[in-house]
Image: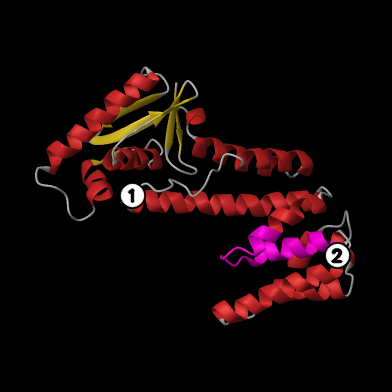
């Protein structure tokens, strides 16, 4: 069975053993077909993904050669069962089983955990951690990416960000605020500014008896927003700061902290 991994450096495995797909264009072709998620990709689109605006002379022959080479490699690995590279409506399509592509597995687990969160936040958080563990780095890694790969990679990255925010909300609802402080602290200090993570960190710190540190997190975020973007914190973050100063009941363990975002 062939398995494909795009939530990080592009990888292919067979029988749990790494399989090397060599050549920049072969890897870009595989990444593009995986990004299409089973939707046929026209020859013109593949040319744009592989060569941009500068295709080689006789690109039709070059593309067909790359397609044939990749098809043979996939057939060797999958035996025609878990993955097939086929021609459909004058376009090319990589058919894969849902459980053989890590991005598909992640999106499915993410959706299931969100449904579970309505009834069992602790179990939902555990399921979401399992889904997030599939990530090994930036989607598609260092593969030379065309517009399709970039678009899909951004969609996966956005889903990962929402999954993290959802996870921390679930952990706060489950009373596991102390457990998420290290990870949230790291995310809040990351180069990309994210006020949502700062909100969740402030609540986790407050519920852990660290009011001063919670207020300090707000002050650092406010300073970074002013220095890097020239803006003030959102009204939500400012209201949370005041709620902490005033020991708002919604901040207590077991209370619904989501009302503070209303």
For label 1, count other residues whose C-alpha is less than 10 Å away and answer few (under 14), some (14-19) or many (20+).
some
What residue sits right under mark 2 in the picture? Answer: 210
Q: Residue 168: horizontal and vertical position, in percent?
A: 72, 53
Q: What residue occupies the far left of the structure in this picture?
A: 57
Residue 14's place in the image compared with 164, above or below, is above
Q: Residue at x 34, y 53 (%)?
A: 147
> Are circles 2 and 1 on residues that touch, CB within 8 Å?
no
Lower position in the chain sequence, tag 2 or tag 1? 1
Residue 223, picture quadrant: bottom right
Q: Residue 73: horizontal and vertical position, in percent?
A: 31, 25
Quarter of the picture containing the N terminus is: top left
Number of numbered tags placed on the structure image: 2
180 sits to left or right of 28 = right
174 sits to left or right of 113 = right
What residue sits right under mark 1 in the picture? Answer: 144
Q: Residue at x 50, y 43 (%)?
A: 7
Q: Which residues are magenta?
A: 185-206
């Amino acid at each position: 069975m062939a398995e494909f991994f795009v939530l990080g450096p592009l990888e292919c495995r067979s029988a749990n053993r790494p399989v090397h797909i060599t050549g920049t264009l072969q890897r870009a072709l595989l990444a593009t077909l995986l990004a299409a998620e089973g939707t046929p990709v026209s020859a013109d689109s593949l040319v744009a993904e592989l060569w941009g605006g500068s295709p080689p002379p006789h690109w039709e022959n070059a593309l067909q050669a790359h397609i044939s080479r990749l098809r043979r490699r996939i057939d060797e690995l999958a035996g025609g069962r878990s993955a097939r590279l086929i021609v459909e409506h004058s376009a090319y399509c990589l058919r894969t089983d849902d459980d053989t592509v890590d991005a598909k597995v992640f999106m499915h687990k993410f959706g299931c955990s969100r449904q579970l969160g309505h009834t069992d936040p602790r179990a939902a958080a555990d399921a979401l951690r399992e889904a997030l563990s599939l990530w090994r780095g930036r989607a598609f890694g260092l593969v030379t990416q065309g517009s399709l790969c970039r678009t899909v990679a951004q969609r996966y990255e956005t889903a990962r960000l929402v999954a993290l925010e959802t996870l921390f909300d679930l952990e706060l609802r489950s009373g596991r605020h102390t457990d998420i402080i290290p990870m949230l602290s790291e995310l809040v200090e990351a180069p990309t500014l994210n006020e949502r993570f700062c909100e969740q960190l402030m609540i986790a710190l407050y519920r852990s008896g660290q009011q001063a540190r919670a207020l300090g997190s707000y002050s650092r975020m406010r300073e970074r927003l002013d220095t890097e973007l020239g803006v003030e914190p959102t009204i939500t973050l400012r209201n949370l700061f005041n709620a902490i100063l005033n020991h708002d009941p919604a901040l207590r363990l077991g209370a619904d902290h989501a009302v503070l975002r209303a």
